[in-house]
Image: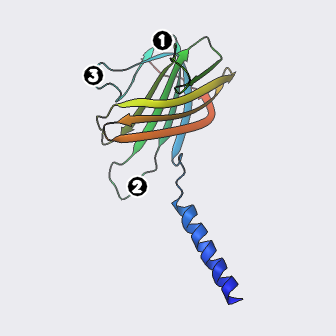
Amino acid sequence: MQKIFTATVVATLALMAVACNKVDPLEGAVERKFYLNAELTEPEEETGTYVKWNKGEKTIFRFVLTHPDNKDIADDELSEIFWVEIPNNITSFEYDSKTDSGLGEMELYYTRACYCYFEEGFNITSVRVKGSKLNQQQWSVEFEMESSGKYGDYGLEDKGTYTIDTFDWD
């Protein structure tokens, strides 16, 4: 009986250790928004470090993952942002960099932002993204992407409902 109890305790502790070490890829605050009549452009310098928002004729999807704050580290707040830009007049889209030859009229960007600011541009090395319009206020979008930067490689994935938002241009 003692051996069964000991085995159960050891198994429970091992399971807890494995479960506690598992990191949820979306741990943190997630924001899923889309914007009409907008356009994204990369800056001429520091390509890949950020994107500029402008008035335009496109629809923009913006996924933001803001990582939890570590109270022991000053200014560690980090957000990862994945952008998709499509023409206004379509109701669905799909792209897979492993099988499709070109983006067509779609544009994709990945940026990272933090209070500490770092000049690191990112190139998307692999991506699969698709979306479909649910109604005038919502889209269903899912993606998996990988990127490379000066300090490392990063991956991000999500599947969710994006809601319409507005941007004050003035």
Q: What mark, if any, has residue 128 been given in the picture?
A: none
Q: Nearer the viewer, residue 157 or 42?
A: 157
Quickly name the residue at label 3.
45
Q: Residues within 10 Å of mark 1 (few under 14, many from 20)?
A: few
Tag 2–tag 3 contact (CB < 8 Å) = no
Q: Which three-letter amino acid code belongs to the residue tagged 2?
A: Asn
Q: Is residue 12 above or below residue 135?
A: below
Q: Are marks 1 and 2 in contact (CB under 8 Å)?
A: no
Residue at 51% across, 30% down:
127
Residue at screen point 45% across, 13% down: 55
Please provide percent x and percent y for residue 69. Answer: 42, 51
Instruction: Kindly check if marks 1 and 3 are in contact, taking CB atoms under 8 A apart as contact.
Output: no
Q: Secondary structure at mark 2?
A: loop
Amino acid at circle 1: Gly
Left or right of 136? Residue 54 is left
Q: CA distance from mark 2 to mark 3?
A: 32 Å
Q: Residue furthest right?
A: 1
Going from N to C along the chain, the mark reached first, 1 or 3, is 3
At x 58% / y 70%, what residue is drawn? 14
The first of marks 1 and 2 along the sequence is: 1
Secondary structure at numbered mark 1? loop
Q: Residues within 10 Å of mark 3 (few under 14, many from 20)?
A: few
Residue 157: percent from the left, percent from the top?
54, 38
Instruction: Give the number of the mark in front: 2 or 3.
Output: 3
In the rendered image, the vertical position of residue 12 relative to residue 108, given as above or below: below
Res 70 label: 2
Colour theme: rainbow
Q: Quadrant of the N terminus?
A: bottom right
Q: Residue 116: x and y, percent?
A: 30, 42
Disc 1 designates what residue? 56
Residue at the far bottom in the pictured view: 2
